[in-house]
Amino acid sequence: MSIVLITAAFAAALAFILGITLGFFKDFFAVPEDPMTANIREVLPGANCGACGYPGCDKFASEVAAGNAPANACTVGGASVAEKIAAITGTEAGEVVQTAAVLACQGSSKYAQLKGTYTGISTCRGAKTAGGIKHCMWGCLGFGDCVKVCTFGALSMGENNLPRVDYAKCTGCGLCKKECPLGLFKMIAKKQKGAITLCSNYNPVKTMVIRACKIACFKCGICMKNCPQKCINMSIQVPMVDYSRCNSCGTCVDKCPSKAIRLLEKVIV
């Protein structure tokens, strides 16, 4: 018993000495924080999402204080945060472009043909590594990796086994885009108007596309041929829209045989 008590007392004494020593060295080697950095950090939302281009709010605050980052880079905080940062740094807030995530795929299990029964790891990355679960190799894998990383609760899995975006909550942080192994999310300005192709199948062979997904872009080019503004091109096998010329007339939407094109005004709502 005496050995146990001696050991316990020695351990307690050692812990006390180490605690005092660590506390001393912490204060001795502490790097004083720049007051401006601290003030900027205080007004940030604290999401640490990386939407600003930096690994976290602390790094962003220090870069702004150093003059290496603009006051309006925090899209999560929006205009109000940009104005507060500008007041602290004595700079102009500038315009904050609020973006949102748009899933460029409509290939739910209802429309996209499955290869078979998948029994591998139930993640999108796992399924992609295994060769995918759909005949469309660009189609959403549907395991919700994007939902798991969304820190704002803006993503959920819909009944069609595709992620659904709540645009009232989406801050445009881009975490879902980074997480998606197929890169199916596009970050679009919330105020942007015009047509968008909700398909990422870049296979140029029309018959293979049709067999793989009934709601994919069939590469027919009807949208491009009928566009009054001539603002659509098919250079990458899916319609790309020049928003500087698109006036949301909706002709492409009406003409598309598979309904792969929609107006952003009716998507980001």
Image: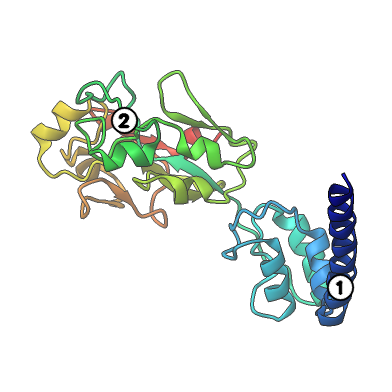
Q: Position of residue 257 (x, y in %)?
A: 22, 28
The quarter of the image holding the C terminus is top right
Q: Describe the element under mark 2 as helix, strand or loop.
A: loop
Question: What residue is drawn where x is 57% and y is 41%?
Answer: 150
94 shown above or below 239: below
Q: Residue at horizontal 76%, vertical 58%?
A: 44
| Residue at 81% across, 81% down | 29
Residue lying at the far front of the rendered structure: 2
Q: Amino acid at mark 2?
A: Gly
Q: Which residue is mark 1?
A: 21
Residue 224, image x, y percentages: 23, 45
Q: Is residue 1 left or right of residue 249?
A: right
Q: Earlier in the sequence, mark 2 or mark 1?
A: 1
Q: Nearer the viewer, residue 52 or 38?
A: 38
Q: Number of marks in the image? A: 2
Q: Residue 201: percent from the left, percent from the top?
A: 24, 41
Q: Circle 1 sits in a helix, a strand or a loop, which is it?
A: helix
Residue 209 place in picture, x, y as percent: 16, 34
Q: Is residue 93 above or below residue 101?
A: below
Residue at image mark 2: 120
Q: Residues within 10 Å of mark 2 (few under 14, many from 20)?
A: few
* Nearer-the-camera pick, 26 or 226: 26
Does 115 sit left or right of 58 as displayed? left
Tell which of 151 and 187 is nearer to you: 151
Q: Is residue 191 visible?
A: yes
